[in-house]
Image: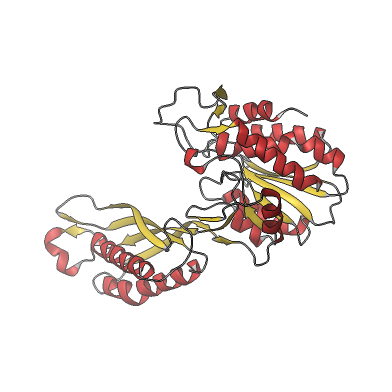
Amino acid sequence: MQDTLTILERLCAFDTTSHKTNLECIEYCRQLLSSAGFDVTILPNAEGSKANLHAVTGPKERPALVLAGHTDVVPVGGQQWTSDPFKLTQKDGKLFARGAVDMKGFLAVALSLATTWATEARDRSLHLVLTYDEETGCFGAREISGYLRKVIPANSICIVGEPTDMRPIVAHKGILGLRATVEGSEGHAATIATKSNAIHFASELVQYLLGKSQYYSAMSSKNTYATPKSTIQVGLIHGGQARNMIAKRCELEFEFRHLPEDSSDVFLTELNAFMTSDLLPRMTGNQEDASIQIETLSNVPAFRVTENSECLRVLKERLGPVEIGCWDGVTEAGYYADAGLDTIICGPGSISQAHQPNEYIAARALEDCSKLLRCLALH
């Protein structure tokens, strides 16, 4: 089996930016794992342009150790790199490349240990899960979640190897991303008294969202998130054609980043109630065919570790005294938890390097991760 650095070099050479295919990368991983004796299943998306990968070795009916990570990376456009972002560059104990820390470093460690697992841990069930499109909404993990529930036994533990400096992350927020399309009526600005201006009513929707944001900000919370509240923000708004024309259409995109205890379903139900019982009746008073449509762009579940987590107990035992934390960002962990897996987020490198120009991971971090994964797999 190839060593970690060789594998990382190959992984980073694949430009798996989220809007591109990851099939060549997945095929490379399939070949490595198949040659190591893993039973490998490729699960393509509906278009056949991308794929998830599931690999297993050992008794399939026994509780398993599952290692999970995504193959896609964020774009490099507009960033000032001092080296080729898709060619692994070593300097002063650091390994520079797009995806080096987020999160091909973890994948390289897992793949490099595959031969050891297949030969030395034959009595243990070990799984690798590689996904697509985590960076754009965790779509690959959402697709594979139901499949994993069927093929991985209950009482299995899962480690999502995002860059946490090998610190267990036991909770993170969820994201509900929405687009609202407000349709009013066009006409001369002088006739506004008898028309429904889409921008005006979209602005009322924004005011409603700001009010909900203040509601969540006022709620008391005791946790270790950087922002210990659920938040709402409007990121995009487009509408109208000219100053002296009534705007027929206005679109806005916004997101609800919520703590595990704040339900996205409740938020969406209340939002729909406001639109249908308050906003829309006033719009249709001026224009019968006025409308508001809500489209879900992303809906990544929040994550919180299960009570009495065996995975957390094992990690604390192996890592020794270590700080445990929560993240404001999101990962695929919620989907693995939904699949019935006892899940923790823990991986090499620092999240502060992710998505940055000259992204890097320290070689020492890969070594520490390798020691931990080998210990978990064999003992």
Examine the rendering and report whether any part of residue 23 can be seen.
Answer: no
Q: Residue furthest front?
A: 321
Front residue of 236 and 323: 323
Looking at the image, is 206 positioned above or below residue 69?
below
* Residue 308 in sight here: yes
Which residue is nearer to you in this view: 358 or 209? 358
Question: Which residue shows up at 54% across the image and 26% down it?
Answer: 86
Q: Is residue 223 left or right of residue 90?
A: left
Which residue is found at the position 72% from the left and 43% from the top?
373
Q: On screen, 68 above or below 11? A: below
Percent position of residue 102, x then y: 55, 39
Identify which residue is drawn at 27% across, 74% down. 282
Vertical side of 9 occupied by 234: above or below: below
Q: Is residue 26 above or below residue 182?
A: above
Would you identify the image quadrant in which residue 204 lies? bottom left
Where residue 321 sits in the image (x, y, percent)?
62, 52
- Describe residue 125's horizontal placement relative to residue 227 as left or right: right
Q: Looking at the picture, how far across and down is residue 38, in whole percent?
A: 81, 40
What residue occupies the far bottom of the structure in this picture?
Answer: 277
What colour scheme was applied to this rendering of the protein? secondary structure
Q: Quadrant of the N terminus?
A: top right
Residue occupying image coordinates x 47% and y 41%: 352
Answer with left or right where residue 72 lies relative to residue 254. right
Residue 165: which quarter of the image? Answer: top right
